[in-house]
Amino acid sequence: MRSTERILTTHTGSLPRPPELKDAAAAGDDSALRDAVGTVVRLQTEAGIDIVNDGEMSKPDYATYLAERASGFGAESVAFRAPLCDAIDHPEWGRALAATMGARESRACVAEVTRTDVASVHRDIANLTAAAGAAGAVGTFLTAASPGVITQFLPNRYYPTEQSYLEALVEAMRPEYLAIHEAGITLQLDCPDLTAKGRRSEFEQTDLHAWKGIMASHIEALNAATADIPPEAMRMHLCWGNYEGPHTHDLPLREIIKIIFTARPALLSFEAANPRHEHEWRVFEDVKVPEDKVLIPGAIDSTTNYVEHPELVAQRLVRFAKLVGRERVIAGTDCGFATFANVVPVFPTVAYAKLRSLAQGAELASRELW
């Protein structure tokens, strides 16, 4: 999908869930989930978003949901840990973030991973398709965890090597990817494992050369899992960790962008609005974007309750359009507004106000570009 007549709008995925949805889901109330998706799609289209999704209403977060749809995962209790380097530099910030996130029960791979539930993705597809049809959406997408990001949120305690764990995840996720594509919905692969976010745990001190090798293996796994899906039917999302914090140890986009371009998805969603990464639009002044790639730069920050002015949004979009061509720019957000269902840094009404501003800014940019 390209912006052939105007700058199209979308977002990254997660949106605030209704408070009652968690209990309804636990009780197996599919009607509550269906209603929630209908509402969240309507709110997106009313805000002016063209390419909508289900707000990730059925998922606790974007990465660990596989543990509910496959066997081989066991519980382990862990305390949330703020990104290591940021927390060392700013311990008071690290303690505050950890207190906000709280203790949580996590999962790890403790046995052979076997996909046991494909019905859930078909339910998500049906809910989104019905809601998008009712709301008159221009296009749809569904998010899915990449094999690489799963290794970081559901750590390996079973397979002899990380590579063998990645290969198992490729097989576990392939049916989900194919189901989304075959339904005529754009597949979004969430890939924060390819940026500095992936270095916040065991890879924190990994040098750049070694890190690029890890990135390459994760991209190889992603490409294998999506080999039967056309590149133009997929988008991938990058971020450096969707949290309001220092981010002074984030890898520069310039250092990793050429490796990123080796991934199969044709559409690339990435942070371009927050104070740490907005300047990186200039990377594309001298790094050539392959002709088959479409950019979805974030024109709205996803961690603060500031509502960006539409003129600022337009300025950000026009910069990219003048570098790569107006038809190869779609307006997006830096990341999701509710990455974890129980942690909502941006209040729901503010999130939709931001989306309205995104749409208004895209309209202003379109007037200038067309």
Image: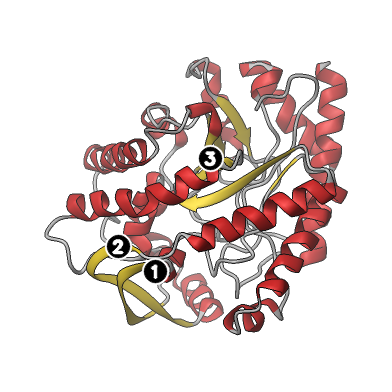
Where is 109 relative to 50, above or below?
A: below
Q: Are marks 1 and 3 in contact (CB under 8 Å)?
A: no
| Residue at mark 2 | 114
Where is 323 relative to 14, above or below?
A: above
Q: Quadrant of residue 160?
A: bottom left
Spatial separation of the CA atoms under disc 3 and disc 2: 21 Å
Q: Which tag, 2 or 1, sits closer to the chain's start?
A: 1
Count of residue discs: 3
| Residue at mark 3 | 181
User: Which label number is shown at residue 235?
Assistant: none
| Residue drawn where x is 34% and y is 55% of the image | 172
- What secondary structure is found at the residue carrying circle 2? strand
- What secondary structure is found at the residue carrying circle 3? helix
Q: Quadrant of residue 29?
A: bottom right
Amino acid type for the residue under numbered disc 3: His
**Picture coordinates of residue 159, whole percent (x, y):** 16, 62
Spatial separation of the CA atoms under disc 1 and disc 3: 22 Å
Where is 169 relative to 209, above or below?
A: below
- What secondary structure is found at the residue carrying circle 1? helix
| Residue drawn where x is 29% and y is 62% of the image | 114
**Picture coordinates of residue 141, whole percent (x, y):** 62, 44
User: Quick one: label 1, few (<14), some, or many (20+) residues within 10 Å?
Assistant: many
| Residue drawn where x is 83% and y is 24% of the image | 366
Task: Please identify the quadrant where the N terminus is shown.
Answer: top right
Q: Is residue 190 visible to us here?
A: no
**Picture coordinates of residue 178, whole percent (x, y):** 46, 43
User: Which label number is shown at residue 67?
Assistant: 1
